[in-house]
Amino acid sequence: MTHGTPDISVLAEDAEPSTAERGEFTALERRLLNDFQRDFPVSERPYAELADRLGVSEAEVLGALGDLTRRGVVSRVGPVFRPRTIGVSTLAAMAVPGTRLEAVARVVSEFEEVNHNYEREHEFNLWFVVTAPSEARLAEVLTEIEARTRLPVLDLPLEHAFHIDLGFRLW
């Protein structure tokens, strides 16, 4: 649940930190982060298509995205659908004792229906989105999370949708 640049714990006195250690980005990483927040290719081989557009190999695209993920810059690459267009979803929250937060977050993340979870500074300190093919499966997931964590889940279904475009130029 932590994000950011890697911890630089040990460097030889005369060694220069790498680009990744300094939190800097290669030209390819900048293009991937900047140019594909929207209009990501939907095809049999989307990464090959990105590679063609960028003039690099598919392996280079996959390597760069893997490195960005390992560094905590990218948490996921995937589609975002408007609510209620494919299946059903809900926002959920839990009040988790601090000593159990990491363990409970791991349990929540084990469900393929959970898109992501994050910590908030509030009594309800663990928040997550659940997307399922039906209301019945959505209810099952919430019930299973409660059973496995032995903590109640606050279900906060969407009442009114707002479109917030979070894509923006980084460089």
Image (cartoon, grey):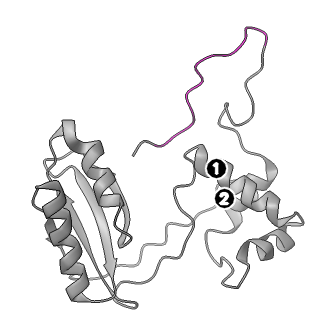
Circle 1 is placed at which residue position? 68
Q: Amino acid at mark 1?
A: Leu
| Range of residues picked out in magenta | 3-14
**In which quadrant of the rendered view does residue 63 lie?**
bottom right
Residue 127, percent across and down?
26, 58
Q: State the image coordinates of residue 40 (x, y, percent, origin top left).
A: 66, 76
Label 1 secondary element: helix
Q: Is residue 10 magenta?
A: yes
- Is there any visible trace of residue 18 in the rendered image? yes
Q: Quadrant of residue 116?
A: bottom left
Q: Spatial distance from mark 2 to mark 1, Cα to Cα?
A: 9 Å
For the residues labelled 2 and 1, say whether their Cβ atoms are less than 8 Å apart. yes
Q: Please identify the residue farthest to the front as the structure is shown.
A: 148
The label shown at residue 33 is 2
Q: Is residue 2 above or below residue 113?
A: above
Dot 2: within a 10 Å radius of its alpha carbon, few (fewer than 14), some, or many (20 or more) residues? some
Q: Which mark is residue 114?
A: none
10 Å crowding of disc 1: few (<14), some (14-19), many (20+): many
Q: Position of residue 1 (x, y in %)?
A: 39, 46
| Residue 99, x across and y down, in percent | 20, 36
